[in-house]
Image (cartoon, rainbow, N blue to C red):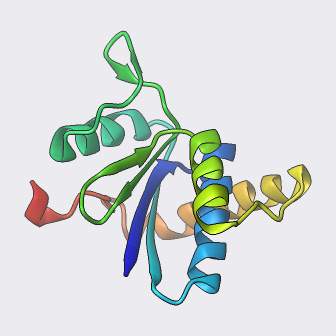
Amino acid sequence: MVHMNLAGRVNSEEYAICERLLDILSVTLPDFTASKTSYRQDKWPSEAAELSRVYGFRVPTSAHLVICEVIVWFDTGRLLCTDVDAFSTFVERQYGVQLDLSDAEVMIYIKANVDEMRLQQPQHPHTRAVPPSAQ
């Protein structure tokens, strides 16, 4: 059984592409699951820093701010990657999966993610990718 986690900036092209690749893996592989958590653009740097602190990830930073748009890791706590190119390469080499979306379709995914977050915000304003047991 393989489980991957994705966290990232909701309005990011990288997040939308990683999300779609995880969806494809979930449908095509019998023993694969994924968790996906998106964050508002203004919240992402602090949430990414918190994930890095809790799990001990080394992520790209500039002036002490996290600059990656996604973090992908295994349920074991091992960091897989912090960018869409590395993730796309990994899933293609490991599982033979490629992105099946055009640039226009990726933009539709981004809009849908942003719209979904807007709908959920009043109900779940403090959703976090860091499990309480890891803090």
Total residue callouts: 0
Q: Is residue 51 above or below residue 104?
A: above
Point out residue 96 in the picture as x, y percentages from the top left corner: 69, 66
Point out residue 36 in the picture as x, y percentages from the top left corner: 46, 65
Q: Residue furthest top?
A: 63
Q: Residue furthest front?
A: 93
Point out residue 106 in the picture as x, y percentages from the top left corner: 79, 55
| Residue 94 picture quarter | bottom right
Q: Is residue 127 above or below residue 90?
A: below
Q: Is residue 27 above or below residue 44?
A: below
Q: Residue at x 20, y 47 (%)?
A: 55
Point out residue 12 in the picture as x, y percentages from the top left corner: 63, 44
The answer to whether 124 appears left or right of 26 in the picture is left
Q: Residue at x 20, y 64 (%)?
A: 131
Q: Residue at x 24, y 41 (%)?
A: 50
Q: Residue furthest bottom?
A: 30
| Residue 91 picture quarter | bottom right
Q: Residue at x 80, y 52 (%)?
A: 107
**Is residue 111 shown to the viewer in this render?**
yes
**44, 79: nearer the viewer:** 79
**105, 101: nearer the viewer:** 101
| Residue 20 picture quarter | bottom right
Quadrant position of the N terminus in the picture: bottom left
**Is residue 12 shown to the viewer in this render?**
no
Quadrant position of the C terminus in the picture: bottom left
